[in-house]
Image (cartoon, grey):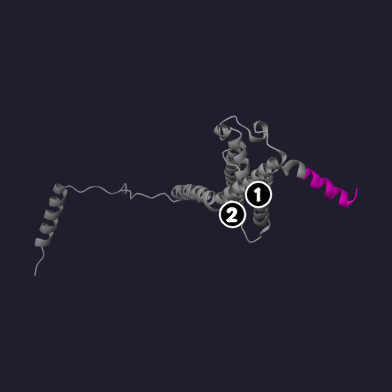
Amino acid sequence: MSNASLFMKFKDLVAKHYGENPGKMLIHTGVIGWILSAAAQVVAIVINDKIPKEQKMFLVPQEMADAAVNIVSFYLITQTFASVANKLVKTGKWLPGAVRDFFEKGGLADKLGKKGFDVKLNGNLPDELLKKYEKFDKGIDVIATTVGSILSCNIVTPLIRNEIAANRQKRSIARMNSKNSEVNPVEKPSVSPSYQKVSLKDFQALSSRVYTSSSNLKV
């Protein structure tokens, strides 16, 4: 099979799955980009001989956890933006001016934006207006997906990742301190078993003996 034939099949496959929904392609390519970036980071850590094995055992799971946070937050946020925008266009809440005028003149303006109303299925749009509507729908899809990806990559994902990293660091420090306290416990001063407490009576008897013996000294 020639390279041209393979390329045409790939192009037809992309057009079939993403031709009517370009925002979906942006989301899926974004997720693939995050996966490839995380895989490159993990491989770079593993093959780096300057990083000790003990650190690799910590860095690799940490990098994979960060990648999971990045991918999940990116997908959820961008998909939510795209879904909300698609619903607003589909129900007629957002429409190009020509299409809205068509509905207003046809007495269907009160149905726009209502739940269960579908512009393509219930609107009976002429071919020219249908093309304008589909073009508008694709444009809103791309804009909503782009805004969602920007918000996810630059604001939400860094905040979530930093919060998780801070909590992970606190747990690591606490675990380290706990291990250090077990290895080097604080020793309390102990009383020697040979030590005997001297009472006041014993001290007086000892003093009298010293005084008596010293009185026998001659000058």
Q: Which amino acid does label 1 sit on?
A: Gly
Residue 161 drawn in magenta: no
Residue at point 66% right, 42% down? 133
Q: Residue at point 66% right, 45% down?
A: 138
Left or right of 100, for residue 173: left
Residue beneath disc 2: 55
Q: Is residue 13 visible?
A: yes
Q: What element carries label 2?
A: helix
Q: Answer whether labels 2 and 1 touch (C-beta < 8 Å).
A: no
Q: In this view, does 22 lie above or below 122?
A: below
Please tell me in which quadrant of the rendered image residue 106 appears.
Answer: top right
Q: Nearer the viewer, residue 147 or 99?
A: 99
Tell me which residue sits at (64%, 35%) in the image.
Answer: 119
> Mark 1 Cα within 10 Å, few/some/many (few <14, many 20+)?
some
- The residue at the point 14 percent across, 47 percent down is 201
Spot occupied by residue 19 in the image (x, y as percentages of width and height): 73, 44
From mark 2 to mark 1, how far is it between C-alphas?
30 Å
In x, y percent, where is residue 60? Answer: 62, 50
Quarter of the image for the C terminus: give it: bottom left
The answer, for residue 64, to whether it is visible in the render is no
Label 1, secondary structure: give it. helix
Instruction: Please state the extent of the stretch shown in magenta in the rendering.
Output: 1-14
Q: Name the residue under label 1.
A: 30
What secondary structure predominates along the stretch shown in magenta?
helix
- In the image, 155 versus 120, the foreground residue is 120
Q: Position of residue 191 (x, y in %)?
A: 31, 48
Instruction: Assess disc 2: are there few (<14), some (14-19) or many (≥20) residues with their C-alpha within 10 Å of its C-alpha.
Output: few
Outermost residue toward the bottom? 219
Q: Is residue 14 left or right of residue 163?
A: right
